[in-house]
Amino acid sequence: MSSISLKAYAKINLTLDVVSRRPDGYHNVEMIMQSVDLWDLITLQEIRQGIELDCNIPDLPRDEGNIAWRAAQLIKTEFNIEKGIRITIHKNIPIEAGLAGGSADCAAVLLGLNKIWNLGMDVKKLQALGKRLGADVPFCLVGGTALAEGIGDMLTPIKSKEDIWLVIIKPDFGVSTKEIYSKLKLEAIRNRPDNPRMIKYLETGDIQGISSSLANVLEEVTIPMHPQIHRLKEELVAHGALGALMSGSGPSVYGIFADQEAAKRAAQPLRGKYGQVFVTKTVSNGIILSSPDFFQ
């Protein structure tokens, strides 16, 4: 096998709680992560040497500034691989959005190279490598719905209903995750998630309960810096969302809708106001092989 194509799925946070700061600069979190049907296409092709990276987004780094490039370098170093790889990324997931697009691409490179070079790594080994590259990478490798603890790498799968319909809006600005976490005052957090309650609603498929239990403590930092995020949440609810939340450190906001038609109706007027509006749904996978005739 000398080439492979994979779909790398975005994630949202249904809940996000920050428990404590760690000496290594990370934070201990307790959050529920959910894969959604919005994906990048990653194609890996073996070359004679080196790492080449191309992308349909001009501003994305083509070198070690890109986490997908670093994933390839880590694999080559760990396994003493002399052959090279060309990484082609067709991005659909917005960048700097709080949707783990970079981590998903990284996970796809790890999984794809494991297959191309027959490295024989199981999921646990892949996740251990992924953790060295980014806190969201272990989740992106498996996807679905999970309670994430530690820095986000300790995962407990949750059985949940698929096909919960969403509208995701990415505002026309980005935020720095590092800056948001640095400004969070743990002792001042007012609205912490109730993760056990959210898990119960997910397991029973109670969409009203899920929608009423959305909570993200990072909103307390990001929204005062960018009040538009609060207005986006209000606008989604005004257009029929059962609940709305900022994902990750922001700035993307999503709303949960009763069904696909309700989501489509809400998205129509929003697309006239905001550049990046996606109608999507929850899915149970993180990375999957793309069919060879995908673009035919």
Image (cartoon, grey):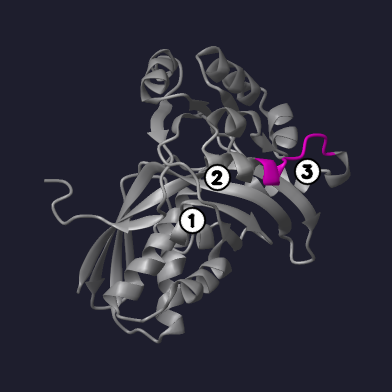
Type of amino acid under label 2: Glu
Question: Reading the chain from its start, which is encountered first: label 2 or label 1?
Answer: 1
Crowd band around label 1 with a 10 angstrom C-alpha radius: few (<14), some (14–19), many (20+): many
Q: Residue furthest bottom?
A: 80
Question: Reading the chain from its start, which is encountered first: label 3 or label 2?
Answer: 3
Q: Quadrant of residue 206?
A: top right
Type of amino acid under label 3: Lys
Say which element carries label 3: helix
Residue ID for mark 3:
183
Type of amino acid under label 1: Ser
Q: Is residue 183 left or right of residue 159?
A: right
Residue ID for mark 2:
203
Q: Quadrant of the N terminus?
A: bottom left
Crowd band around label 2 with a 10 angstrom C-alpha radius: few (<14), some (14–19), many (20+): few
Instruction: State the residue in front, 34 or 68.
Output: 34
Say which element carries label 1: helix
Confirm whether the magenta stretch covers residue 47: no
Query: Looking at the rendered structure, which numbered label has been put on residue 103?
Result: 1
Q: Percent x, y for residue 200? A: 62, 43
Q: Is residue 66 visible?
A: no
Q: Is residue 53 left or right of residue 94?
A: left
The prevailing secondary structure element of the residues shown in magenta is: loop
Q: For the point 44% across and 81% down, which residue is it? A: 77
Q: Is residue 77 left or right of residue 183?
A: left
Q: For the point 74% across and 61% down, which residue is it? A: 25
Q: Is residue 258 left or right of residue 295?
A: right
Q: What is the magenta range? A: 189-197
Q: Are marks 3 and 1 in contact (CB under 8 Å)?
A: no
Q: Percent x, y for residue 44? A: 27, 64
| Cα gap from disc 3 to disc 1, whole angstroms | 23 Å
Instruction: State the residue in front, 177 or 144.
Output: 144
